[in-house]
Amino acid sequence: MDIPRDASSFSEERDCYRPAPRHFLSDQDHHNCVVDRIDLFQRVLADTSASRGKRIEALKFLVHFVGDIHQPLHAIGEARGGNEIHVIEFGSTECAGRPCNLHFVWDIGLIEHSARRETTYAASLEKIIASENLSRQAGGTPEIWANESVQLAKKVWLNNGGAVDDTYYRTNINIVSHRLALAGLRLAKLLNETVGR
């Protein structure tokens, strides 16, 4: 998603690529944003006349894209979703052998800094789901999820050279966990509605 930072919400016309006769093969490559792709792959998965291979591929993309749309920096267009915002992550300018950037911090860095095992982290997400009754928010549409994410991206934004330190971590790790929990709930609901129980 490339929602402008100064926009209040997602606009399909502005934020999704559309076919243009002057671009080679553009008529075959529209629906080129995650909101449209989730809808497209949900329809493929639901289509019992589609080949098994196509439906498996659709399932894989749905799992990936529902997760992506809940990561705040996947929704904002500014600085390529934070990829061009170089930060200092817990005292280091290098992350996984490359210059640290804000997008990487939100994809990996904050979760790794929690130093929790996957099973422990998953258990903490289940506690969040129960204590906050997140099941109430399991529905919605990809457009709503994108709008939530872009608003959060604005909230957690850092400028070039900003510090991702323990204060930033403590302020934002609950957002990471909350978004992961919602992504799981919403993916489950979407799959149940698409292929049944």
Image: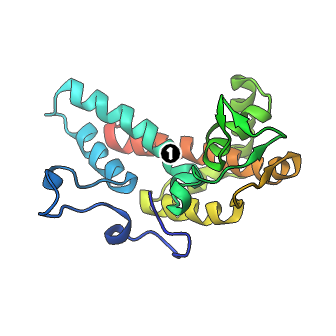
Of residues 129 and 142, the one drawn nearer to the viewer in this rendering = 142
Examine the image and state in which quarter residue 121 appears: top right
59 relative to 21 in the view: left or right: right
Mark 1 nearby-residue class (10 Å; few <14, some 14–19, many ≥20): many
Of residues 117 and 79, the one drawn nearer to the viewer in this rendering = 79
Instruction: Name the residue rendered at 44%, 36% in the picture.
Output: 63
43 relative to 136 in the view: left or right: left
58 relative to 191 in the view: left or right: left
Position of the N terminus, as image quadrant, is: bottom left
Q: Position of residue 74 (x, y in %)?
A: 52, 52
Q: Where is residue 46 in the image (x, y as percent from the top left)?
A: 25, 40
Q: Where is residue 77 in the image (x, y as percent from the top left)?
A: 49, 61
Instruction: Name the residue rendered at 22%, 30% in the picture.
Output: 54
Instruction: Name the residue rendered at 75%, 35% in the picture.
Output: 124
- Please tell me how many numbered marks the rendered image carries: 1
Question: Is 154 rendered above or below residue 197?
Answer: below
Q: Which residue is under mark 1?
A: 68
123 relative to 35 in the view: left or right: right
Examine the image and state in which quarter residue 183 appears: top right
Q: Position of residue 98 (x, y in %)?
A: 63, 34
Position of the C terminus, as image quadrant, is: top left
Amino acid type, mark 1: Asp
Residue 131 visible, this angle? no
Color scheme of the displayed model: rainbow
Check disc 1 and report its element: helix, strand or loop.
Answer: helix
Examine the image and state in which quarter residue 152 appears: bottom right
Instruction: Name the residue rendered at 83%, 40% in the picture.
Output: 90
Of residues 80 and 107, the one drawn nearer to the viewer in this rendering = 80
Residue 180 visible, this angle? yes
Question: Is 54 rendered above or below residue 100?
Answer: above
Of residues 24 and 121, the one drawn nearer to the viewer in this rendering = 24
